[in-house]
Structures are given as C-alpha cells and as structure tokens.
Image (cartoon, helix red, strand yellow):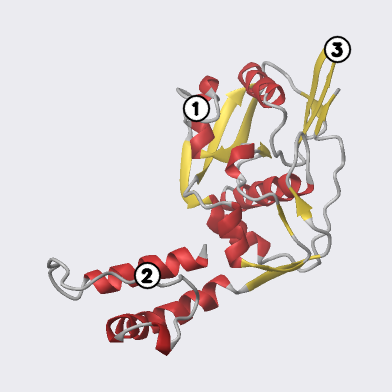
Amino acid sequence: MRNLIYLLLALTAFSCRGPLYSPTVQPRYYKVTDKIEANEAGPQVQNMVETIAPYKAQLDAKMNRVLATVETPLVKGAPESTLGNWSADLLAAAASANYPNTNIAFATMNQGGIRVSGIGAGPLIVSEIYELMPFDNTLVLMELSGKELREFISHIVNSGGWPVSSGLAVHRKASGLTIRIQGRPLADEERYTIALPDYVAGGGSNSTMLKDKERTDSGLLIRDLLIEYAGKISEPINVVVEGRRMRLE
C-alpha cells in the first residue's frame, strides 16, 4: 500500500511541472519500489524522486509509528474472532469517549469493512490500521427501538456474524435468538443507541432496515479513531474469543 501512495505522490509532482506534450522518446518501465537506484533511471525520474523525497520521509514516519504491541496474533473470522472483537471494542470505546452523555449499547462493523485476514504479533504500526480499514467510513450513532434493533441483529446473525463489541451477546439455537444488551435481555419497548459505520447505517451490506432511520454522523473517520485509541493501549494486546458475543448453533 505504501508503494501505491508513493507512486501517486510521484505522479502528482511530475504532472505539475508543466503542460503535457506528445512523447518524443520510447517509454521505459521501472519497477515500483521504495527506492530507485541512480543507475536505473534517467535525470527526469531522479529529479522526481528528489522532489518527493521530503514528503516520502514524512509519510514513512507517519505510517511506521508504533501504536501498541500485539502479543497474540489478531485473526479475522466469523461469527466471532480476535480481530473482530478487538476492532469493535475499540470502536465502542471511541464512540463512548466522543459522546460521553450517550449510553452506547454496543458497536459493530460489517465483515467486509475489515480488509485484512489478520495482524501478526509484534509492534502494531499505523500502516497496518490503514490496511485493516482503507475506506473513509465515518462513525455513526443510531437510536433504534428494541424491535428495530432485533431486526438488525437478526440480519447480522443471518449474515454469519459480524464484529460486535462486548455490549452485545447473541445466542442462536433452534428455538430462536436470545439477545442480551449490556447483560440485560433486549426489550422491544426500550430504545438503544448503537455505533456503526456510515456505510452500514446507509443500508450497506444489505442493512436495508437501517437506510431510512435517523442517524448522527460524527464526521470522524473510523480508521483515525482506531489509530487514536489503539495508541492509548498501554498493555500488550491479547484478545480472547469468548464465544458469547456471537454464538450461532
């Protein structure tokens, strides 16, 4: 991903040098790497590399910043996984911190929103969060009735399970769904506020039951929130799959 960013910066810098004219030389192709050796490129490319070098150094420093330490690899999976639990818990913490006067029942994000299969043990750096969530999805709050929330949770279950924070516990068995919100049974007459990506709130991932509901869009990128709150973790990250958040039998 970093190479792609460098290439885009390079193309932008090169395109700003002046108007484009028909080429008078045969094109040459260069392997895209973090470094172009002097003997591999002509003066134009070298000038381009020198132009973007300061920006590349800044980008490297930003992307390689260590946020935390992963003790046990975080792995994506369904219906429940270490990577899903960690991401959803972090989103719930960010939502609660940004809306301190609101009781966030739980946070969730669609499986497709997580774009990596896992994060290995060792230093967790910023670029890994960009790879985890490359989309510019924002944090949204939605207040739903218990009946509306039950329909949404049923959709999550029927989709094979999504990442959900510890505020939600779902048990599916032959007799139906047992849903508990923050330790209490879901009540149809009560109202609950959940945190989720704007993509899902707008009906994405077949969440059509949410499409026309009122919502509060924070304008905050979920990726940035994950980076911010991962950076506040002082202990090594060691997530355990509890088997309680999304238990489907």
Q: Dot 2 lies on which element?
A: loop
Residue 156's tag is none
Other residues around mark 1 within 10 Å, as few (<14) / some (14–19) / many (≥20): some
From the viewer's perspective, is the residue at label 2 or at label 1 nearer?
A: 2
Cα separation between marks 1 and 3: 28 Å
Question: What type is the residue that disc 3 sits on?
Answer: Ala
Who is closer to the viewer here, 208 or 32? 32
From the viewer's perspective, is the residue at label 3 or at label 2 nearer?
A: 2
Cα separation between marks 3 and 2: 60 Å
Residue receiving disc 3? 174
Question: What type is the residue that disc 1 sits on?
Answer: Gly
Q: Earlier in the sequence, mark 1 or mark 3?
A: 3
Name the residue located 49 percent from the left edge and 46 percent from the top edge: 138
Give coordinates of residue 40: x percent, y percent.
Answer: 41, 83
Residue receiving disc 2? 29
In the displayed structure, does residue 44 sit left or right of residue 125? left
Q: Earlier in the sequence, mark 2 or mark 1?
A: 2
Cα separation between marks 2 and 1: 43 Å
Question: What type is the residue that disc 2 sits on?
Answer: Tyr
Name the residue located 48 percent from the left edge and 68 percent from the top edge: 3
In the rendered view, would you say 191 is above or below 196? Answer: above
In the displayed structure, does residue 150 sit left or right of residue 43? right
Q: Would you say residue 109 is visible in this rendering?
A: no
Residue receiving disc 1? 203
Q: Dot 3 lies on which element?
A: loop
In the rendered view, would you say 32 is above or below 131? Answer: below
